[in-house]
Image: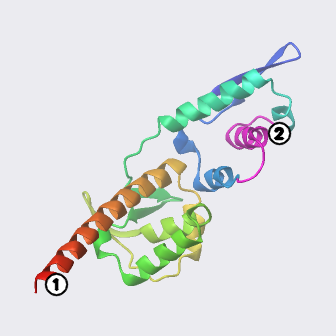
Amino acid sequence: MKVKIKKEGEVETFNLINNWSDVNLETWLSLIDFKEGTKTEEATKTIAALTDIPKRLVQELALSDVVAIMSKIGELQSKQDTKLKNIIEINGIEYGYHPDLSEITLGEYADIEQFMKDGIDTSLPELMSVLYRPVKLKKNDIYIIDAYDGDIRLRAEEMKQMSAEQVQSALVFFYTLGKECSEIMLSCLMETLKETKTQ
């Protein structure tokens, strides 16, 4: 997508991301990591990360240009595809989302729990490397991923190339499933408690 900026009577054209899927996890993490600072600094960082406008020129943008660019970025983000991508490809390798989260191992669960405790904003590549692993066998819509061995350092680096859109859809799916599992567990616990009281 092109952005036209008028500066001293001349119009310059720059590139803005075309889709939210153009933003990788590493870039997205740098944007959500913005905990302190002003809205001006946040806008500067966002525009610098998602356009090819030189940083020195970002500081010289008219406020109306900043508002237009930020609105366009917000619009692209709102149009993202939120459907879970079961299989993604990064650098020529297919990675599959854990095909059955009810069969998650204790080691996987312990690592996910730790990453959530450490803060999802700092542990997303690691979390994604537990949920997505290399596909070792695939036929139609059925696939088998590598077993979890706990050594995720290299895969976490690869996961930084995932699109922010893929990460967000995986998180929504994971959160929804976790919420449903919690409700089911609570219901089962209540039933067990009732049975125990009646006995």
Q: Position of residue 31 (x, y in %)?
A: 67, 49
Question: Residue at left 35%, top 61%?
Answer: 179
Residue at mark 1: 196
Q: Which residues are magenta?
A: 35-54
**For residue 106, side relative to residue 44 (left or right):** left
Task: Kindly tell me whether residue 132 is visible in this rendering.
Answer: no
Q: Chief secondary structure of the magenta span?
A: helix
Upstream in sequence: badge 1 or badge 2: 2
Q: Amino acid at mark 1?
A: Thr
Depicted 126 relative to depicted 179: above or below: below
**For residue 52, side relative to residue 162 (left or right):** right
Q: Quadrant of residue 126?
A: bottom right
Residue at mark 2: 55
Question: Residue at left 58%, top 55%?
Answer: 25
Q: Position of residue 15 (x, y in %)?
A: 68, 32
Q: Amino acid at mark 2?
A: Lys
Q: Which residue sits furthest left? A: 199
Depicted 29 relative to depicted 118: above or below: above
Question: Residue at left 25%, top 67%?
Answer: 184
Tell whether label 2 touches label 1 (CB within 8 Å). Answer: no
Q: Position of residue 181 (x, y in %)?
A: 30, 66
